[in-house]
Amino acid sequence: MEMALRHLLIRSPGGWATVRPMNKLLPLLACAALLPSCAPTFNALSRADRTPVPAPSAPLAAGQTWDVEGGSLAVGSRMTFRLTEIFETAPGVYSNLDAAGLLAAQRGRAPEGTTLFPAVSLNRLGQRLDFYWSENGTDYDCRLENATPNATRLTGRLLLSGSEFGGCTAQLR
């Protein structure tokens, strides 16, 4: 009788087979069912020692405010850029405006019936950051080469209506 309690015999097509009772199988099933719940913990532990990867649009991010100023001894201009959203207007090109808005800002003229908004453009391929704005009929482009993802203050060249005019600085607040 003691042997019958330890093992259950069942008849199978090939003869008698021994089956272990459920009290030995249940712990294994419970372990298998609970093991996936450990995955988030192991994933978090494996990520803890990694350096965070910057967003592809870095140093630009939604919610930022950049103060840009530039000029020469004769003329100067200052503009504040508040980035509410960042769009990928073309592969590797990021802006606070959609593709049409960015193109209008780069050309210095808006389509009829629309407003020309200040624009920011980051070209990841050339690591170039441009701030575009118009003031009193003059189109400004603060061009910053070698923009790094963690940049907070950059200096570059100021272009007025396409011609180099002086220097400019962009500062992240």
Image (cartoon, rainbow, N blue to C red):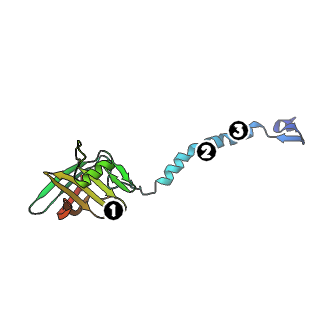
* In this rendering, the label closer to the viewer, 3 or 1: 1
Q: Which mark is residue 26?
A: 3
Circle 3 crowding by C-alpha within 10 Å: few under 14, some 14–19, many from 20: few
Q: Is residue 96 left or right of residue 49?
A: left
Q: Which mark is residue 35?
A: 2
Question: Residue drawn 50% across and 54% down?
Answer: 46
Q: Tally the marks.
A: 3
Q: Is residue 79 left or right of residue 99?
A: left
* In this rendering, the label closer to the viewer, 2 or 1: 1
Give 71 or 147, whichever is nearer the viewer: 71
Question: Residue drawn 40% across and 55% down?
Answer: 91
Task: Label 2, secondary structure: give it.
Answer: helix
Task: Name the kind of residue labelled 2 in the image.
Answer: Leu
Task: Name the kind of residue labelled 3 in the image.
Answer: Leu
Can you name the residue that lies furthest to the right here?
Answer: 15
Question: Residue drawn 26% across and 55% down?
Answer: 106
**Residue marked by disc 1:** 127
Can you name the residue that lies furthest to the front here?
Answer: 112
